[in-house]
Image (cartoon, rainbow, N blue to C red):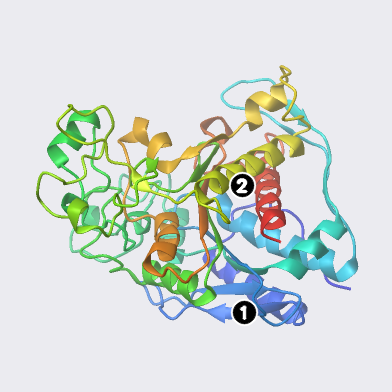
Amino acid sequence: MPPPYATPTVPQTPAQIEAALADLAATFPALCTLGEFPHRSVENREIHFIRIANAPQNGRPAVVLTGGVHARESAPPDALVHFAQNLLVSRTTGTDIVFPARSCRPLPAGPTVNYPPFTIPAVEVERILNGVDLYVAPLINPDGRLFDQLNPPSDPIGAGWRKNRRPHPNPARVGVDINRNHDIAWKFEDYYDMGVYLSFYQDGPASTDSRAETYRGPSAASEPETANVQWLIDDARATYFVDVHQFGRKVLLCWGIEDNGSDPSMNFSSPTWTSKRDGLRPGSPGLPPDRPDYQEFVSNAPPHFVRKTLVTIASEMRDAILRSAGVDPTVSTAKPQRTHSTYDVGQSASLYHPLGGPVTGTTDDYAFRRQFDDPTRAPVFAFTIETGHEEESGFHPDYDSPPGHYAKIEREVHAALVALCNFAA
């Protein structure tokens, strides 16, 4: 009988997460394999992932899940580890995954919200693990997570650390934002008319200043942690990809580099739109009449209907989260559970607009681009989930109950990822 795995009561350290992955591979050898990334972290830490499958690889779709890209986002790595643990126990024992009824108190002083029990049936888990190859990489950035955990909130530099730990003589310039370092429109000034872009948005799609939280790094995929993500996407030949972040209650679909469109000539690899000339992509809607409104191409042709399917999958994840909260997504009733568990669905480019416009160099856009790089490859459906909320302690949710923030977030992550895996299977 495999051991029971409880919801963590404190944020897990990188060492604890690594130990948990090794334990899963040792406990469930018929279902779970431990894999090591080809690159160690900047501070020379080994980084592992697990592959969960009920049979040798035989053409089933590969689902790749990542977390812990941003150091300060406490919940995603723990939720992904527990997601893998629950799936493996359920598949081995034939038992349902059951989340008991819970309460969560929004901050700063909202009334407590009660959530009913939530069950993932064992038959559903069996169907998923028979139908997909699941890769779980819960902690991409162990150096950053440890640095964030060791530095108190009062630390002027270390508190709320986001980046990796790329060294620099000036402590204020340490680190690269891994989620701006991937090889997709990384050198954004070659893709956007920055004069037009900055007239619409406060900040660029990434930063060239190493002091900034969104610093893109010295070159595309310069960071070992970034190279690991790209390697896993390519080695697994991901068909579905989700990067779990925190916070904002959003299910984001690609593209992040621009609004989606239907003109095949408008794509990131087209010389017309990646050279400094009048055709340079403007990077925003509502342009003067003499400038085209650039939109990044996404096919909506049969049999895959990629543009439509992205919205369908994202909407299913949103609805699954609502159902886990005891809310019928099809009935518009005023319930506190709906208020505190509704995730916005939309493009990264659109939903990031209030924060400064489209973004470049992200994990999900790199995964999404691979189908355009290799026309023989199956479509890739890539997403980012921004779980949790400011009222749930932001980047560092309270793991105790009450107020019960982490436990609620974990339920939502499980519900969304099961919905995605069900679609894939």
Task: Please report the residue visible at 49 percent of the width from the left and 74 percent of the height from the top.
Answer: 47
Q: Nearer the viewer, residue 360 or 290?
A: 290
Q: In which quadrant will I find the C terminus?
A: bottom right
Q: Report which quarter residue 164 is drawn in.
A: bottom left
Q: Nearer the viewer, residue 383 or 224?
A: 383
Label disc, if present, on residue 34 of the rendered structure: 1
Could you tell me residue 111's position as x and y percent?
Answer: 69, 20
Q: Report which quarter residue 64 is drawn in.
A: bottom right
Left/right placement of residue 170 relative to residue 325 reads left
Q: Which residue is mark 2?
A: 313
Task: Please report the residue visible at 65 percent of the width from the left and 53 percent of the height from the top.
Answer: 420
Q: Is residue 362 above or below residue 30?
A: above
Could you tell me residue 403's position as x and y percent?
Answer: 67, 34
**Please, what is the three-letter code of the amino acid marked with disc 1?**
Leu
Q: Mark 1: give few (<14), some (14-19) or many (20+) Cα within 10 Å.
A: some
Q: Is residue 137 above or below residue 211?
A: below
Q: Secondary structure at mark 1?
A: strand
Label disc, if present, on residue 308 of the rendered structure: none
Q: In which quadrant will I find the N terminus?
A: bottom right
Could you tell me residue 20's position as x and y percent?
Answer: 65, 70
Looking at the rendered image, the disc whose residue lies closer to the viewer, 2 or 1, is 2
Left/right placement of residue 93 relative to residue 256 reads right
**Please, what is the three-letter code of the amino acid marked with disc 2?**
Ile
Q: Mark 2: give few (<14), some (14-19) or many (20+) Cα within 10 Å.
A: many
User: Of all residues shown, which one is farthest toward the left?
Assistant: 277
User: Of all residues shown, which one is farthest toward the top?
Assistant: 334
Q: Is residue 8 in sight in this rendering?
A: no
User: Of all residues shown, which one is farthest toward the front?
Assistant: 302
